[in-house]
Amino acid sequence: MSRAPRVPRVATHHGGAIIGIDVETACPVHGAICSIGVAVVLGGEVLREQHWYVDPGTRFDPRFIDIHGITPAMIEGKPKLGEAWGDIHRFIEDSIEQTRQPRLFAEMGDDGPSALFVAHNAQFDRMQIERALGAPLPFRLACTVAMSRRAFPRLERHNLKTVSAHLRIDLKHHDALSDARACALIAHRCMLEGAGA
C-alpha cells in the first residue's frame, strides 16, 4: 500500500483551523474502523464537517454495536479506510485551504497558521487509523484529554462526555462526527484557557 499523502505537521497552536478526528470500531481488532468523522473549527465556529462509514474488514462485535449503533448493514458496500483515505485527505486539504487567510500574513511571507489536528485520547485514534491504513498518519495528532487536564484541572474526569458537558458542547457520544466536532471545540476552548497542544 502506498503511503498516505503528507499534511503539514504542527508543534503548537497558533490561531489556524482545528481539525477534530474520531473513529468508531467494529470490534476489538486493531484497525477495524467502521466510521470516521472529521470536523473543522476556526475561531470557535464549526466551518465544515463530514462523516464516512467504512468497511472494517472484519466481523462486528455485538457489544460494539450496542455502544455506537453501527451495524454490518450500514457499512455494506462501503470502502475500507485505505480506499476512502483519498477522499478524507482531500476534504482535510480543502478545509485547510478554505481557512487560510494569506492576505493577513502576506507581509510575513507565509500563508498563515497551519492546522492543528486533535482527537480525544489521540493515541487510540492514531493507532486505529495507522493500523487500518498500514502507514503512519501524515500529521501530528494532539490529544484533547491532555489539553483538557491542563485547561480544566478541577474536573473529576476528562473523558469526552464530561468535558463536553462542562463546556456545554452538544454531544451524541460514540457518533464519530459528533465526537470529532466536540473534540475540535474542546481544543478551541482549551486554547482560550492557555492549554495548547
Image (cartoon, rainbow, N blue to C red):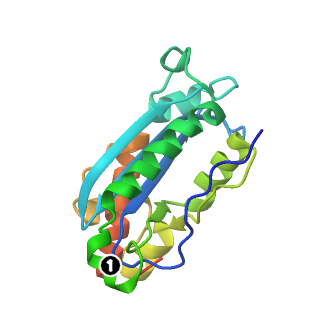
Q: Is residue 9 left or right of residue 51?
A: right
Q: Quadrant of residue 83?
A: top right
Residue at 40% x, 74% y is 113
Question: Picture coordinates of residue 141 (x, y %)?
Answer: 56, 63
> Can residue 146 be seen here?
yes
Return the residue nearer the eye: 145 or 89.
89
Residue at 37% x, 60% y is 184
Residue at 32% x, 70% y is 102
Q: Quadrant of residue 157?
A: bottom left
Tag 1's secondary structure? Answer: helix
Return the residue nearer the eye: 59 or 103.
103
Return the residue nearer the eye: 178 or 165.
178
> Can residue 194 be seen here?
no
Q: How many marks?
A: 1
Within 10 Å of the Cα at label 1, are there few (<14), some (14-19), or many (20+) other Cα atoms?
Answer: few
Residue 146's place in the image compared with 6, above or below, is: below
Q: Is residue 137 left or right of residue 196?
A: right
Q: Is residue 9 left or right of residue 42?
A: right
Q: Which residue is mark 1?
A: 105
Question: Picture coordinates of residue 88 (x, y %)?
Answer: 50, 41
Question: Picture coordinates of residue 69 (x, y %)?
Answer: 45, 28
Residue 53's place in the image compared with 174, above or below, is: above
Return the residue nearer the eye: 44 or 104.
104
Residue 134's place in the image compared with 59, above or below, is: below
Question: Picture coordinates of residue 1 (x, y %)?
Answer: 77, 38
Residue at 72% x, 45% y is 131
Mark 1: amino acid: Phe
